[in-house]
Image (cartoon, grey):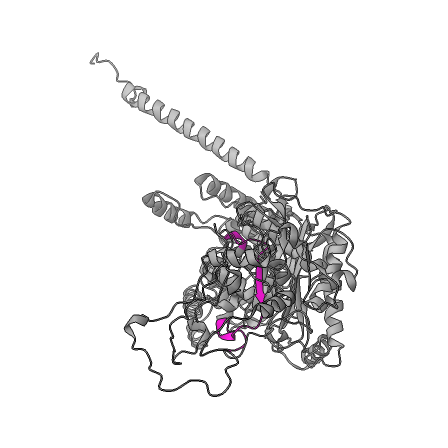
Amino acid sequence: MSNKRQRRPFFLSLWFAIPLLIFLLTMGGVAFFAYTFVQKYEKEAGAFDLSKLDAVESASVLYDRNGNVFGKVFIQNREQVSFDQISSHLVDAVVAAEDNRFYEHTGVDLLGIARAFLKNAKSGRIKQGASTVTQQLARNTFDLRDRTYDRKILEVFLAMRIEKSVPKNKIMELYLNRVYLGGGLYGAEAASRGYFGKSAKDLSIGEAAMLAGLLKSPNNLSPWHNLEAATAERDFVIGRMVEERKITPEQGTEAKNQPLLVQPKSHIVSQSYAIDLIRQQVEGNIGLESVESQGYRIYTTLDPTLQRTAEQALERELDKVEQRSDYQHQKYSDYSAFLKSWKGSHTGPPPLPDYLQGAVLAVDNFSGAIRALVGGRDFAQSEFDRAFQSKRPAGTAFTPLVFAAALSKGLFPGSLCDDSPMDNRQVMVGGTTGILGEWGVERDHNQYEGPIPLRRALAESKNAATARVGIVAGLDSVLRLAKKAGIQDDLRPFPSTFLGSSEVTLADLVTAYTMFPGSGSRCGRLMLVAKIETQDGREVYKAEPQREEVISAAVAYETHSFLSEALSTGTGAPAHEQFGLKPFPAAGKTGTAYNFTDVWFLGYDSALTCGVWIGYDKPQTIYRGAFGSQIALPVWTDIMNASIARDQPRPLGRPFDVKKVEVCLDTGMPASPKCSLAFVADSSLPPRKGTFVEFATAAQTPKETCWLHGDDTRSFLRNLRAMDIPRATSATEVTQVTAVQLHAPTVIGDDPYQSIKPRLKEDTQLAEAKANWTPAPRALPVDKPEPEVRRAAPVGPLDRRQGDPQVDLPPPTPVDLTDDPATL
């Protein structure tokens, strides 16, 4: 027998034991890691409150500027239904399109995850998902929207937890009640009614397939935006339903052959224009889905007192207009009665209302916070917001911007402007012929007054004078200032814009007016939402006021002084005389569009700027003689009276570089000592004060004083001879034109105008003329080093029809005036 040593078993050898030990240690590490990994995410998933699955919608609470609740807004249009109220076709379509193993897996489709993982690893980022219906429900309910692997893993564990706690049909019910299906529609029931006008339980195969197809991209595949894409996606889902044997091939073919018919899009119902604007701003700031799942506290800038006053005052004045005997249009009461009968006998949408409408917007001067908003007469009948969306001609409510542009170019605020007839071809308002006349006047007894101060031209809505001021300012300057002031739409580049013929929104014009109490700067934007908080008080949004410089503080104050006079003694005077405006510092301007189609009033005090518009959605005459001072002004007055209870007005501060200047009423120049009392031509009338006080900067104020009342007539004539008087120039070179040879006298008989042989008057005639002479008002250019007298300007192309002949004559030989008394 051999004495060989017996061999040890292989599992005791080192070459086996060492690898085994390494393997066991590795597996133990993996198991520990897996255990820790699973425990971590199970713990995080267990922290979520599954009761929120049923809390499909949490309304956002609205607070006014005082912190009091004034309403709730349901940001998402949703109607919850039970599983048995949902078409089986829709359930089958969703399973086929989104999660074909929904009734088999435990919340996670591992094969789908593996497939998506490979594609995402290849791209280097999460590009494709394999989310089951349960995972999507978890994500939408608990806002797990970060596209990171950590969030994705947590979503998986949360989905598995949901599957253990909630039955499959209940999961599908919760999912179909929550999902967004485009067009502002949330949930299967709202989408079914919005797109097809029927309940979710009555959906056909094709309709159910279209809704299931929207889950991939609700906005891009919406039939309201892209019917062709929606049809193609519907057909794809039908194909998947056939593949998954949810329907037969014959049913699939029949469904594909049916045209996709949807209803016209309708707006989501809100309670008022203000609440609808809040909804829009909230959507833009924090997103719909977040609001839907959390329920935010939305703090607005609305003042409940001003809002209520605006609504009541506007309705009262509109009702007064409709009660007039000469009112010939649709009335609100008539349309409301018609609407009731229409709903009882028709299924389609009713005709739009055509009754008189109105809008009100009141904002804080410095923050742009909206204190009151009325976008129309009845939000339920018309959701069109006329404060922000309607564009209408503002009439003379636009003219303060024209005067501000002229003052910004250095025009002396005390200058005189000519209030006299103007050829309408220079402005072209309401036509192209005749004289400008009194387009859009604010009174029925308006008369031409000749040369008048700028402030009176603005206060009394003198259109011819305002057009001339606009010409001095320059059309480009006015358009640039309007754009800087917040007028977002492009105004027409024609002189008629000086008188407010271009269309603007009430919101833009109110924004522009805030530059006058704002020392030349306006609100950067108007805001209705001040801040938004979560239910636990965490702030997620806060509005920041913005300011934009438009004009200098000096020009803002000078224009403000004009507007103060417009309210106190001008076209806005009925505010005090008829409508009971309380005595506090305020300013404003009326506006009446051509043919009485639109009436406006915009005004402000130190705290609030408010605008009122009244008119029709389709322009038509309200009635002959419908002025802004009688229809829009009473609404503005009530709102401003209500506002002073909280924000007591104060006088606006005058900039340090703006000084008081006494101005001669006859020349528009700084007054001399003899200007203070001027005599009228009619000796039977009492003498009038010949000066007025104006505000101007040193740069705007002429260096010389009044040339008319400074010396006697002889000194005036000497100064006149020394002046560099501008004279009309010929359009052609007269030296190159052959003179006309006269063969006979041009005047037969008496020559009362001394056209053939001019001769000087006798001394006695001159003395008599000087005794009865009353100086004619004259206006001098501003900031000229030497005084000048304006003479007739050359005939411009706007004063002559195109194609009319032009007659050019050489200028007459000037009469030599000397100091010799004999020649006088």
Residue 217 picture location, percent across and down: 46, 59
Tag count in the figure? 0
In the drawing, does residue 132 fall left or right of residue 685? left
Q: Is residue 306 above or below residue 493?
A: above
| Residue 741 is a magenta residue | no
Q: Please report the residue visible at 42 percent of the width from the left and 64 percent of the height from the top.
A: 240
Spot occupied by residue 521 in the image (x, y as percentages of width and height)? 56, 47
| Front residue (pair 411, 557) | 411
Quarter where residue 8 is shown? top left
x then y, percent, for residue 330: 68, 79
Q: Residue at x 45, y 33 (%)?
A: 34
**In the displayed image of the protein, which residue is found farthest to the top?**
3
Front residue (pair 79, 371): 371
Q: Quadrant of the N terminus?
A: top left
Residue occupying the far front of the picture: 822
Residue 401 in sight here: no
- The magenta stretch spans residue 428: yes
Report the side of 602 relative to 121 (left or right): right
- Residue 367 located left or right of residue 805: right
Establish if 676 lies above or below 686. Answer: above
Residue 540 seen anywhere in this rendered image of the structure: yes
Q: Quadrant of residue 619?
A: bottom right
The region drawn magenta spans 407-431
As drawn, is 163 to the left or to the right of 237? right
Residue at left offset 50%, top offset 46%: 145
Establish if 663 lies above or below 342. above
Most prominent secondary structure in the magenta stretch? loop
Query: Horizontal and vertical percent for residue 653?
Result: 66, 44
Depth order, front residue of 507/72:
507
